[in-house]
Image (cartoon, rainbow, N blue to C red):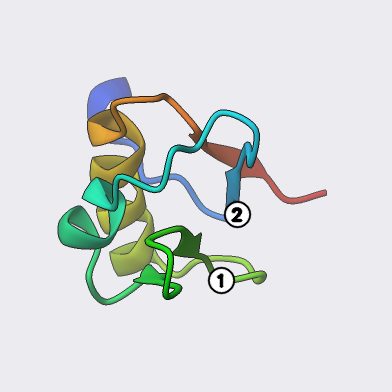
Amino acid sequence: MTDSMTVMTNVMLRIDPQACDGIGMCAHLAPDLITLDRWGYPIIPTRVLDVEEVSQATKAVKGCPKKALHLIANK
């Protein structure tokens, strides 16, 4: 397996609430993972993500126009 194909495990999705403008792109890119509140701000899981969720979360992180989403290693 090459480095670019390595699957991240034990990962959590985090948001910088000060950077987020509630655009909602993340929920479109990760619909099974992220929902929006009534003002358009993301509601994200507070647990370690499974492999399929990491894939969706990565798309949301890359697609966030404000760069407010981050994947972090769970300690």
**First in sequence: mark 1 or mark 2?**
2
Is residue 16 visible to us here?
Answer: yes
Is residue 2 visible to us here?
Answer: no
Residue 46, quarter of the rendered image: bottom right
Identity of the residue drawn at 34% across and 37% down: 6
Query: Is 29 in front, or is 11?
Result: 29
In the image, which disc is placed on residue 45? Answer: 1
In the image, which disc is placed on residue 65? Answer: none
Whether pointer 1 and pointer 2 mark residues with C-beta atoms closer than 8 Å, the reply is: yes
Question: Which residue is label 2 attached to?
Answer: 12
Identity of the residue drawn at 23% across and 43% down: 59
* Side of 8 where 5 appears, left or right: left
Residue 5, quarter of the rendered image: top left
Image height check: is 30 above or below 64? below
Task: Label 2, secondary structure: give it.
Answer: strand
Q: Position of residue 55 (x, y in %)?
A: 27, 53
Quick one: which residue is furthest to the right in this view?
A: 75
* Side of 23 where 44 appears, left or right: right
Query: Is 57 in front, or is 63?
Result: 63
Q: Amino acid at mark 1?
A: Pro
Q: Position of residue 1 (x, y in %)?
A: 25, 34
Task: Label 1, secondary structure: give it.
Answer: loop
Q: CA distance from mark 1 to mark 2?
A: 8 Å
Identity of the residue drawn at 56% across and 28% down: 19
Crowd class of label 2 (few under 14; some 14 to 19; many from 20; radius 10 Å): many
Q: Position of residue 72 (x, y in %)?
A: 63, 39
